Image (spheres, rainbow, N blue to C red):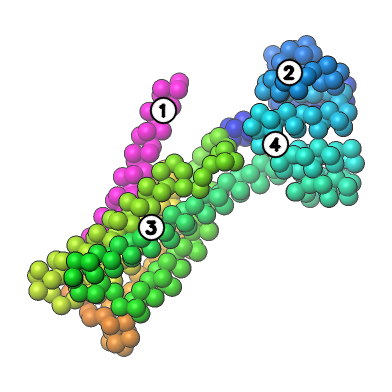
Amino acid sequence: MDACRRAGIRVIVITGDNRDTAVAICREIRVLDGADAGAVGRGQVYEGVDIERMSDAELRNAVRTARLFARTAPEHKQRLVAALQANGETTAMTGDGVNDAPALKKADIGVAMGSGTEVAKAASKMVLADDNFSTIVVAIEHGRTIYANTKQFIRYLISSNIGEVVCIFLTAALGMPEALVPVQLLWVNLVTDGLPGLALAAEPAERGVMQRPPRPSSENLFSHGMWLHILAIGLLLGGLCLAVQAWALSAGHSHGQTMVFTVLTLGQMAHVMAIRSEFDSLWRQGLLSNKPLLGAVLLTFALQLAVIYVPVCNTVFKTEPLSAMELGLCLAAALVVFIAVEAEKAWRRSRAATLNQVAS
């Protein structure tokens, strides 16, 4: 129950048992503290007869603070689910009997016990094979992790593509030499975007993921500044590629296209390592906390070096070997992307700390 409270999940017990028995059990499992279990109808503990006396509006008000409903009938469970949903709550209902099926069906997420009736299982969206309530908490943590990793994948992929588009468009608009040839762009999309992007799915749960309130069901995928991050990093990556090519042209270097290709690749590698968390720095997470991603980044880096320095790859990918200074400049440009994302996360941490101080 402590884990549920920290995660912003409110647990309400609905049972047909006697009130005193239900209160004792709820105290034992810490749904109710000793001071919470007052007289029937005083904000936290109710009986079925109280539900019958209440209008829909009164019931909606009661469920805002309720922790226990005892001596309830199946129709009471349906009304309680409806009242919670009318308050804008995302509601999960657990049950195992035939009489639980209507409420399980009505809830946003019906959770049946594996040992329950087939009717209850058919009415539910989820079945607990081990009949253990803590499994629901574990499932919520996994769900939050999957959602966060999906957002990071989208963040990485779209910002990388914006960087490519900005680079190609601006060089053409400014009359500069072609930034990338088709085979280089194909390489970036298949290798640079693909391997590290897929490895993001292996990212473990972020620190504090179960200490955050649930996100609203109506929340947009690009909320909390995600669209701004995507646009800013895309423009930064494209701008860095443009700057490197301009430097190569002004300095009389003939490797401008290869440098742009390398900055685009290494900049995306720096970005994917930095966006593993929305808040924690890479050093706090640890380089080895996602070994598949680290392996994908190192492999991509090695393949990129092969494309630059292996003669047969030069022919296929239209690249030229870079000098140590040119490669160092490409690495420095990629580091700018990494620093920018880490600075954004530092700002997020500072802002969250300030808001917590104001709230306390």
Which residue is depicted at the point 29% across and 87% down? 315
Which residue is depicted at the point 76% across and 23% down? 56
Among the 4 quarters of the image, the one containing residue 347 = top left
Percent x, y of residue 21? 85, 22
| SS for dot 2 | helix
Q: Is residue 48 visible?
A: yes
Q: Which residue is mark 1?
A: 355
| SS for dot 1 | helix
| Spatial separation of the CA atoms under disc 1 and disc 2 | 34 Å
Q: Amino acid at mark 4?
A: Thr
Disc 1 + disc 3, Cβ < 8 Å: no
Residue mark closest to the camera, 3 vs 2: 2
Residue mark closest to the camera, 1 vs 3: 3
Using residue 349 as the reference point, say whether residue 85 is left or right of it. Answer: right
| Spatial separation of the CA atoms under disc 3 and disc 4 | 35 Å
State which tag comes first along the sequence, 3 or 2: 2
Q: Which residue is mark 2?
A: 58
Q: What residue range appears in magenta?
A: 332-360
At label 3, counting other C-alpha atoms closer than 10 Å, the crowd grade (few under 14, some 14-19, many 20 or more) is many
Q: Which residue is mark 4?
A: 91
Q: Is residue 341 magenta?
A: yes
State which tag comes first along the sequence, 1 or 2: 2
Q: Quadrant of the N terminus?
A: top right
Q: Which residue is mark 3?
A: 159
